[in-house]
Image (spheres, rainbow, N blue to C red):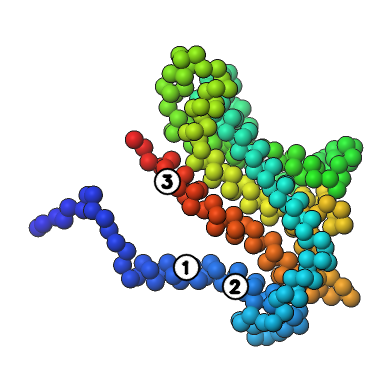
Amino acid sequence: MKIKQTAGRQHHAGPLTYVLLGLAALVSLFPLYWNLVAASHTGERVVEAPAPLLPGPHLLDNLTFAWNQVDMGEALVNTTVVAGLVAASTVLFSTLAGFAFAKLPFRGRNVLLALVVATMTIPPQLSVIPLYRIITDLGWVDQLQSVVLPSLVAAFGVFFMRQYLLEALPVELVEAARVDGAHSLRVIWHVVFPVARPAMAVLGMLVFVQAWNDFFWPFIALTPDGNPTLQVALAGLGSGNHTINQAIVLTGALISTVPLLLVFALLGKHIVGGITSGAVKS
């Protein structure tokens, strides 16, 4: 019996693989396609049965109405600012804390890490009342800082970066930098950040999307008529005469989705490339 030598040989996908991938892509893209279809029809046509499957002639009218009804432009700017600040701060602080938990020996490290991880089991609803009282006392109601500051760091990000640096960053590399006279900030800037860049890109992407789509706390801290984020603004779309125009609501959802699609289209290759380079060990 002969055994084929497959080591180092490049395998090509068969027809069945392409069929399955095509079906998975169609299933994944269909909700976005139907969102576009619904945004191009009237509210009465969207709720009729059977539902429309082809685009209609009212897309531009719905876009104009949704954009002007709740000042979608201001909401888009606010969401970009909030999501960008939350993503940047979470990546920075999570990388620093993850490096400390992974490579710096100090007393109580494991206990403190366990406490950080344990905070992920606490439902966010439990902190709403005390957090709202704090921002009320500070005069931050309907201000963007009331959404940004409570999300500057996340326990998941700390644990994620700790697990990555635990394997990706050799302790000998840190010790060599110390021997060469590098202080802590220089070690972090020239050693930790370059090694952690792939994980930082992934974490930043995940946090940015989560902050962009966050609704629960922004809906409590902000108002649609003040400084709304996109998700808060969407809550006020399509209402009038005791009815809700579903086509206008879906048009607003389409507007809020397009920027994320552009981010993935522009940066997706760099993020995947960073993940791939970080996965290869020399």
Number of disc labels: 3
Residue displayed at 53% across by 67% down: 28
Q: Which mark is residue 228?
A: none
Residue 276 in the figure: left or right of residue 88: left
Quarter of the image for residue 19 reads bottom left
Asked if residue 41 is positioned above or below residue 111 in the image, the reply reads below
Q: Which residue position is annotated with label 2? A: 33
Q: CB of mark 2 within 8 Å of CB of mark 1?
A: no
Q: Under tag 1, what secondary structure?
A: helix
| Residue at x 23% of width, y 53% of height | 9
Q: Nearer the viewer, mark 3 or mark 1?
A: 3
What's under tag 3, amino acid-wise? Thr
> Which residue corresponds to the image point at 38% horizontal and 68% vertical from the top-left?
18
Quadrant where the N terminus is found in the figure: bottom left
Residue type marked 2: Tyr
Q: Position of residue 176 (x, y in %)?
A: 43, 18
- Horizontal side, residue 163 vs residue 88: left or right: left
Q: Which residue is mark 3?
A: 276
Q: Is residue 205 visible?
A: yes
Which quarter of the rendering shows the C terminus? top left
Q: Could you tell which of marks 3 and 1 lies nearer the N-terminus?
A: 1
**Residue 24's mark?**
1
Front-lying residue, 181 or 224: 181
| Image-quadrant location for residue 247 | bottom right
Q: Do tag 3 and tag 1 residues touch (Cβ < 8 Å)?
A: no
